[in-house]
Amino acid sequence: MSAPTDTHLQAAYIVLRYLKNDPTQGLFYSANSALKLTAYSDSDWAACLDSRQSITGYCVFLGDSLILWRSKKQHKISRSSSEAEYRAMADATLYHERTKYVEIDCHVVREKLQSGFLKTIHVQYALQLADILTKAVQPALFKSLLGKIGIHIPS
């Protein structure tokens, strides 16, 4: 946003056309949803071709209802995909943006794991809901993920 280019404007037009073509999409919040928090986080390591900053994406559900989501560039350049993933997990866990060092993120995640607040599990590619926030995915997978995060798409 600090130095927008024509490419950014074209991307904005694509998003606006997408929204215009399907104004019936929306989030569905079930009245019978369980009171269980589930979060998905992902990062696309060194995805920005200009700065080589990674992109973090996460979405948080209360039961089946999407209550929080975010996609953004990480502030620091990660030296590895693991470092980028730790930053994404820490952001999804604490929603903090001013952590200076990855070691702090690692300790925060480890502390949350040890306390039982966090539980890490492997998520298959087709079920990784945060992918939709960090990278381009195939159209069929995109539509599938939209449905899984609770975006209502009328038939």
Image (tube, rainbow, N blue to C red):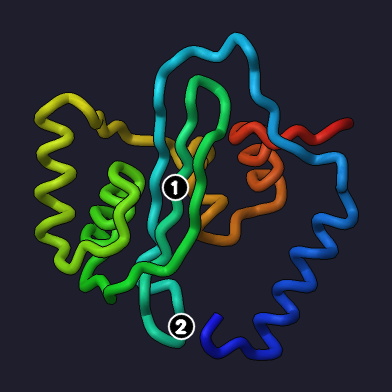
* Residue that badge 1 annotates: 58
Q: Residue at x 44, y 15 (%)?
A: 35
Separation (CA) of disc 1 from disc 2 = 21 Å
Tag 1 secondary structure? strand
Left or right: 38 as drawn, with respect to 68: left
- Quadrant location of the C terminus in the rendered image: top right
Q: Earlier in the sequence, mark 1 or mark 2?
A: 2
Q: Is residue 139 above or below residue 39?
A: below
Local packing at callout 2 (Cα closer than 10 Å; few below 14, some 14-19, many 20+) is: few
- Quadrant location of the N terminus in the rendered image: bottom right
Residue 4 x %, y %: 61, 87
Residue 32 x %, y %: 60, 9
Q: Residue at x 66, y 40 (%)?
A: 146
Q: Who is closer to the viewer here, 116 or 81?
A: 116
Q: Residue at x 16, y 62 (%)?
A: 102
Q: Is residue 87 above or below residue 67?
A: below
Q: Who is closer to the viewer here, 101 or 132?
A: 101
Tag 2 secondary structure? loop
Mark seen at residue 78: none
Label 2 amino acid? Leu
* Residue that badge 2 annotates: 49
Local packing at callout 1 (Cα closer than 10 Å; few below 14, some 14-19, many 20+) is: many
Q: How many marks?
A: 2
Residue 37 x %, y %: 40, 25
Q: Quadrant of residue 36?
A: top left
Residue 52 x %, y %: 37, 80
Q: Is residue 92 above or below residue 11?
A: above
In front: label 1 or label 2: 1
